[in-house]
Image (spheres, helix red, strand yellow):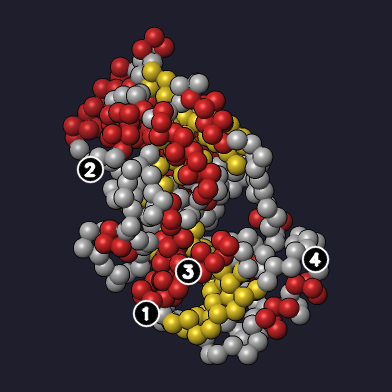
Amino acid sequence: MLASLAATSLLALSGPRSNAETAVIAVGYLRWMERRPAISLLDQQPADDGLAGAQLAADDNNTTGQFLGQSYTLIDKPIRAEDDPVAALRSLGSQHVGLVLTDTPADIVLKLADAGKQSGVTIFNIRAPNDSLREEQCRGNVIHVAPTRSMLADALAQYLVWKKWPRWLLAVGSHPDDALLADAYRRSAKRFGARIVQERTYKDTGGARQTDTGLVQTQQQMPVFTQGAPEYDVLVAVDENEVFAGYLPYRTWDPRPVAGSAGLEPVTWDASSESWGGAQLQNRFVRLFHRRMTGLDMQAWTAMRMIGEAASRANSADPAAIMEYMKGPDFGVAAYKGQKLTLRNWNWQLRQPILLSDGRNTVSISPQPGFLHQVTELDTLGMDRPETTCKLR
């Protein structure tokens, strides 16, 4: 510790390196521009969602990098559904970018990974929660900063079981992503001893979710949708497309708490998080971008900080050297979550605590007390090493 402080003091005394000595680390961001409507106007996705978090982390990296002869540049590359993501990746490659963040859907992440492998590019998945990306479709050149659906479901399941609310009514949306998340909750219930007393499907019939009146979606439909259920402790909503879950709290037939996609939600970050220096991070973010920090912002921030941490420890701006250190046993990154975050070396998923938020407060943080593991309690969230089907290539 004293040696580390001494080294830091010497760096501070020596001052920043000259421009001639500075090595530029260029990081690309393939940013998904497609937006879907949200139930609440308060939940509309900011135009710079994710990008702002990456920019803040680039600034943080440059604060340290100036003493190490390293400078970080973030190259924003917006893409839409009609665009060719591989062409966008090649465009970044022409600018000598070997490290790329992306918040695209899972199928595009796979395309980027396969195209990037040919040119030695590493992809940082900061959004897609698909377990398949870490399992049967895993790739050796993809780092998963976003948690999986199974990690999120396990985080909520642990808390509900800890609270002794083991009987769940599972309300599932009608989209394919909802089916995948429902599978994760079924697995979590079995894993931790909860019981799904009944499942109900909410059909998405379309309509303007932001303008439909409460008479259509809430006062009448939600109580009827939940009427006549077997005795249950909590309603677990599965609604990744934000079609109906936000209408459930305070509108169920029986007076029961709502969790999952509304009510008590498992998230990677929340604007109310203030522990372990989180308030300072949130305040810096608000000063710069004049809005609250989202989960996607935090995942982008974490990815950029992972790159900065590995580059400083490896003392190199070479993407290959950066990734060699990041995939090594000594790597870890601080992310305002109370402990060092590390990578699972069987599928390159970032281990991380999951916050449980009600939209105004951080109610709890998983892993919960009493859920033990022989290596790290963080591996009680999501697919553990004995369960994995990943064969990295």
Q: Is residue 213 above or below residue 316?
A: below
- In which quadrant of the rendered image does the N terminus lie? top left
Q: Say what secondary structure mark 4 lies in.
A: loop
- Residue 193: which numbered mark, if any? 1
Give the residue drawn at x 67%, y 68%: 244
Q: Is residue 312 left or right of residue 35?
A: left
**Residues tagged 1 and 2 counted as in contact (Cβ below 8 A):** no
Q: Give the mark nearest the N terminus, 2 or 4.
A: 4
CA distance for labels 2 and 4: 53 Å
Q: Which residue is mark 2?
A: 329
Point out which mark residue 212 bears: 4
Amino acid type, label 4: Asp
In whole angstroms, how far apart are the C-alphas of marks 1 and 3? 15 Å
Q: Which residue is mark 3?
A: 183
Point 55% across, 90% down: residue: 230
Location of residue 389 (image quadrant):
bottom left
Q: Earlier in the sequence, mark 1 or mark 2?
A: 1
Identity of the residue drawn at 62% across and 45% down:
291
Q: Amino acid at mark 1?
A: Gly
Name the one closer to the observer, 255 or 126: 126
On the rendered image, what quadrant is the C terminus found in?
top left
Mark 3 to mark 2 CA distance (whole Å): 32 Å
| Residue 205 location (% of width, % of height) | 74, 68
Verify CB contact (< 8 Å) between mark 1 and mark 3.
Answer: no
Q: Please report whichever mark, 1 or 3, sits nearer to the chain's N-terminal start.
A: 3
Q: Label 4, label 3: how many angstroms apart (C-alpha)? A: 30 Å
**Cα–Cα gap, marks 4 and 1:** 39 Å
Of marks 3 and 2, which one's residue comes earlier in the chain?
3
Name the front one of labels 1 and 3: 3
Nearest to N terminus: mark 4 or mark 3: 3
Q: Within the image, what quadrant is residue 381 found in?
A: bottom left
